[in-house]
Amino acid sequence: MAFVLSCAWALIVAWLISRAFGQRNTIPALKPLSLSSREFAPFVTVVVPARDEAGNIADCLTGLLGQTYPQDRLRIVVVDDHSKDATFAITAGIARDHARVCVLKAPPLPPHWVGKPHACWTGTAAAPVETDWFCFVDADVTTKPEALASAVETADLKRLDLLSLAPRQELGSFAERIIIPCGLYLLSFCRDLGAAQAAECQDAAATGQFLLIRASAYNGIGGHKAVSTEICEDVALARTIKRAGHRVLLYDGKALISARMYVGWKTLWPGFTKNIVEMLGGPAASLTLASTALVLAWATVFVPLIAGTGCAHGDASACAGLPLAAAASAAALGLHIAGAVYFRIPFWYGLLFPIGYTIGVAMTIDSLSRHMRGRVQWKGRTYP
């Protein structure tokens, strides 16, 4: 029995590693580019939805104002979504010194709208009529000078209608470092990114941290009004645009943008619990996937332990399976240590991944409970 368990464990780990590397290769890296010579650059309106982002908005705007993109073809619209902190005051101060920045206060949230889609929708309504591209950037995103030019040039060259950039994730606290890598690994294991990236597939891959969308495509689907009730509005918007016959592609943008999504447990837990069910494909799928991840994570510890215990008691098949079980568990650890290195955090966080997946299951159960009770909460709002 121990030998069969060890063999099964080795096959599972081999598949997981193959899956992880295969998924990584489906997302091309976007490298810094300059705009090709042309008489007029496309007009870009950057929309930044901001709710209680006093700690981030100045850095976000500093990055956007430092873009190499032609300044006369760029407008930045910040929509303050009823912040309770100094977000509006900070943004208004920056806007006074920079004519390209416009700051708005979002109107009251209408029925059947989630806050972020409504803020984005409000921002597009204030865009100049000559806008060729909308670029939606989260307030916690910092951009390098070439980010916008690189995105626009690539979208034009590839004839894309929506280009999304996955940022380099900045992980500051213990909670972020133990949870976020596990969450991203789980997504890579359960979502077929290769299929989602294919033009013929109705699914789409995107992240709302940076979405560059051709204005004609955006307006053609009705803008964010088409996804007004969606908690995960980024993927929903990308799917809607793709199903309307437009081209959508997700790029690895870590060379151009970075973001710190959450700061410690206070924002990490509610941030994940509002999204988990949608990100993992619904209530049944999310519970199944999170539970499977939990079992496999702890199998790293217990499968070699079972084989070792059997071998110590003279079970020849257990002794035969022990090296295989140990090698598979070492490979699983190596995969997560590689993830820690990728995220530029101490390698030993990779050794703690069973704890990360355990917390992930608790988050999933909490998320399911909130969805079933119609009490999904985020930044002081409750959504049915």
Image (cartoon, rainbow, N blue to C red):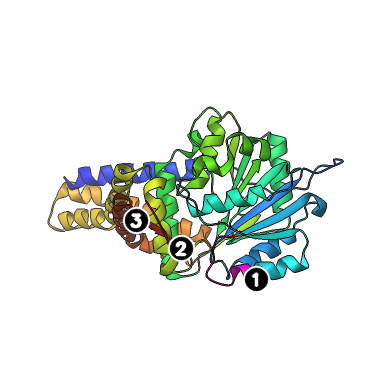
Q: How many marks?
A: 3
Point out which mark residue 375 bears.
3
Judging depth in this view, the residue of 226 and 38 nearest the camera is: 226
Question: Which element carries disc 1, helix, strand or loop?
Answer: helix
Which residue in the protein does label 1 denote?
A: 90
Considering depth in this image, is 124 or 364 the residue closer to the camera?
Answer: 124
Q: Say if residue 334 shows up in the picture.
A: no
Determine the residue positioned at 78% across, 55% down.
Answer: 68
CA separation, marks 1 and 3? 31 Å
Q: CA distance from mark 2 to mark 3?
A: 13 Å
Do tag 2 and tag 1 residues touch (Cβ < 8 Å)? no
Relative to 277, say whether 226 is above or below.
Answer: above
Residue that numbered label 2 is attached to: 379
Query: As shown in the figure, which amino acid type bears the numbered disc 3?
Result: Arg
Q: Is residue 263 above or below residue 29?
A: below
Whether residue 276 can be seen here: yes
Q: Position of residue 261 (x, y in %)?
A: 51, 61
Q: Secondary structure at mark 3?
A: loop
Which contiguous range is marked in magenta?
80-90
